[in-house]
Amino acid sequence: MRFPTPLEEGRLVRRYKRFFADVLTQTGEPLCIHCPNTGSMLHCMAEGARVWFSRSDDPKRKLPGTWELVETPHGRLACVNTGRANALVEEALEAGLITELAGFTALRREVRYGEENSRIDFLLEYPAGPAYVEVKSVTLGYAGGAVAAFPDAVTTRGAKHLRELATLARNGVRAVQLYCVNLGGIEAVRPAVEIDPAYAQALHEALAAGVEVLAYGVTLTPQEIRLDRPLPVLVSPASI
């Protein structure tokens, strides 16, 4: 996925109230831009970090730009716009790059389902029946390591989605949790049990119920993001 307009580079001043970030452009212009990330962005940002943002000339927008990428304190690029994950996955699905999910005949987005009033990111139709695919964007990395973790903050919503998928799997419906790892230099993914043990437990229970757990890494540049390789998911007790 290429960015539709060239990203602008700047430096992070601060992120605040979750959805706002102050940046300085390369010309010294101070801007308040939208931060499209509801998580803690742990290990993703520091004062003065290099950032890349898309600028909009839409007069209806309250903020002139959207924060897209950041250079983390560990020197990695991360895509902090969580809305990009679904678009990346859809692009890869349509191109047949996610081999475990190839061969579908129809794709639907944001379909209501489940006992807890959820929406599934993708409902794929196959001759043998449907597959429900939930996507999570992963950006949490640690110094000196190539294993990313999810989530970066307690997520009751994420645990709910795993419960919904587990119920589907127990009823014989194909259910898939897919981690889109929007962080460079990563070779595997694990549940962040140190941050949200309830989510880690829900993931173990989902696996036991028959939910498929997949992870794919991306190649990141300020010009393009491309989902391009499968990654192992480490979920044994020894790995968390």
Image (cartoon, rainbow, N blue to C red):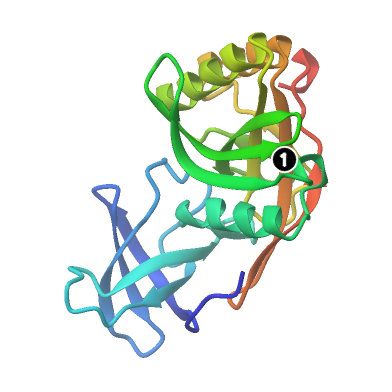
Q: Quarter-wise, where is residue 23 in the image? A: bottom left
In front: 166, or 139?
A: 166
Please state the horizontal and vertical placement of residue 177, each as a whole percent of the image. 64, 31
Instruction: Report helix, strand or loop for mark 1.
Output: strand
Q: Nearer the viewer, residue 185 or 210?
A: 210
Rendered location of residue 41, percent (x, y) = 46, 46
Asked if residue 179 lies left or right of residue 27, the reply is right
Give residue 214's quadrant in the image. top right
Question: Is residue 110 positioned above or below 52 on the image?
Answer: above
Residue 115 in sight in this render:
yes
The image quadrant of residue 170 is top right
Say how many tags the image has. 1
Query: What x and y, as percent, mark residue 105?
Result: 69, 46
If the image is split into quadrants, where does the C terminus sit?
top right
Q: Which residue is found at the position 50% from the left and 24% from the top?
A: 161
User: Which residue corresponds to mark 1?
Assistant: 215
* Residue located at (26% from left, 75% from top): 64
In this view, the residue farthest toward the front is 127
Q: Amino acid at mark 1?
A: Ala
Q: Residue furthest bottom?
A: 27
Which quadrant holds the N terminus?
Answer: bottom right
